């Protein structure tokens, strides 16, 4: 693949991610503000965004720190929350199997909800997935830069406006995810998957450490797979 | 508590699950049924995240108009049924959120 094609894919990844990245800005600001008001030092706050780079985990760590939770409990919670990334990573395995480790390592480090959403959206739209790692890296690097910048701004804002975290700005990210999920609901199995995930999440929201999210995801995926194979069998029978 | 210890441990615990499947790709063969299952990951996980952060507020189920997140999500959902454009969907959600905050 030519350098030109690579950089155009890289740029495309960043451009396609821009709505979700813009939607993540408030999240970064709130994280910076929240961390600094719970007593994390400015450098530690920024380092968390630079080295951990996982919004949900960072928020959970900071809010558990605020309630003086013991380190092992914080770490266990972070790990459980991060297990969804393992699902993301597993679902992209076919796309990375021919890539050298020098690509796989940064791609893993930068794997977020946002980049995964945009990349899987691109996969669903395009049959040709060659050079997808450039697209991925474009999305990821844009996300990383914005996340770090917003953390810094948040640290400054947190010292000026301590109640910014209660403004409800996180809504931007949620509607961003709607924009990814809904247009990709095509098959009956897709709708069943979404509906199951929703109802199961409502049933399990009081489970500890976001285990309800993991359980609901597994349940929704199982329902979708069963329905999809049922549907295919019916089509095949009608064919005969 | 040492904040640097926390960050170092979090870095490891975040990177490991992200990297493990990537690292194994090509070395282990995933069965076709699992491969099919994994294509549903985006819908399943993202829908669960959406539900968790919109229908549940402060640890309680909140299916009412005072839940502005719910209004934003509904507006975004309706827009997404009409248009695939991500910017439009996000904008509709945010406008609905702001209107709900100011008017309700």
Image (spheres, coloured by chain):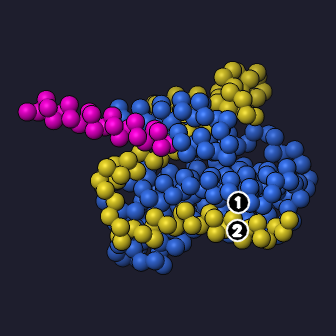
**What residue do we see at 52% from left, 67% from top?**
B19
Which residue is tagged 1?
A75
Q: Which chain carries label 2?
A: B
**Residue B98, how many percent across, how many down?**
72, 32
Magenta includes A233?
yes
Q: Please state, as top left, top right, bottom left or bottom right, where the N terminus of chain A lies in the image.
A: bottom left
**A230 versus A180 height, above or below:** above
Q: Which residue range is magenta in the image?
A: A217-240
Q: What residue is pinned by disc 2?
A: B9
Q: Are marks 1 and 2 on the same chain?
A: no
For chain A, give the colour: blue
Q: Are marks 1 and 2 in contact (CB under 8 Å)?
A: yes
* Residue sitting nearer the eye, B75 or A39: A39
In this rendering, is residue A39 above or below B67? Answer: below
Specify the farthest residue to the left: A240
Classify A221 as above or below A119. above
Q: Is mark 1 on a helix, strand or loop?
A: helix
Could you tell me which chain the residue with mark 1 belongs to?
A: A
Q: Is residue B39 left or right of residue A44?
A: left
């Amino acid at each position: 693949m030519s350098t030109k094609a690579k950089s155009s894919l890289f740029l495309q990844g960043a451009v396609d991610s821009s709505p979700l990245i813009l939607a993540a800005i408030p999240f970064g600001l709130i994280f910076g503000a929240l961390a600094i008001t719970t007593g994390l030092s400015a450098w530690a706050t920024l380092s968390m965004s630079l080295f951990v780079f996982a919004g949900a985990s960072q928020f959970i760590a900071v809010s558990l720190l605020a309630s003086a939770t013991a380190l092992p409990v914080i770490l266990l919670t972070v790990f459980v929350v991060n297990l969804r990334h393992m699902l993301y990573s597993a679902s992209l395995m076919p796309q990375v199997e021919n890539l050298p480790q020098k690509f796989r390592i940064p791609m893993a480090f930068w794997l977020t909800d946002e980049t995964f959403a945009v990349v899987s959206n691109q996969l669903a739209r395009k049959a040709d997935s060659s050079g997808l790692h450039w697209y991925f890296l474009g999305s990821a690097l844009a996300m990383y830069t914005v996340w770090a910048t917003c953390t810094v701004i948040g640290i400054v804002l947190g010292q000026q406006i301590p109640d910014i975290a209660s403004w409800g700005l996180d809504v931007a990210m949620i509607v961003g995810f709607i924009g990814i999920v809904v247009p990709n609901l095509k098959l009956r199995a897709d709708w069943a998957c979404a509906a199951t995930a929703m109802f199961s999440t409502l049933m399990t929201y009081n489970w500890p450490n976001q285990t309800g999210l993991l359980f609901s995801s597994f349940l929704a995926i199982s329902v979708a797979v069963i329905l999809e194979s049922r549907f295919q069998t019916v089509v095949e029978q009608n064919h005969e | 508590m040492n904040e640097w210890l926390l960050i170092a441990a979090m870095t490891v615990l975040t990177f490991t699950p992200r990297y493990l499947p990537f690292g194994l790709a090509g070395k282990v063969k995933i069965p076709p049924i699992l491969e099919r299952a994994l294509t549903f990951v985006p819908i399943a996980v993202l829908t669960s995240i959406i539900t968790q952060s919109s229908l549940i507020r402060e640890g309680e189920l909140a299916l009412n108009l005072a839940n502005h997140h719910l209004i934003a999500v509904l507006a975004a959902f309706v827009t997404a049924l009409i248009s695939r454009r991500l910017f439009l969907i996000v904008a509709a959600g945010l406008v609905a959120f702001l209107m709900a905050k100011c008017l309700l």
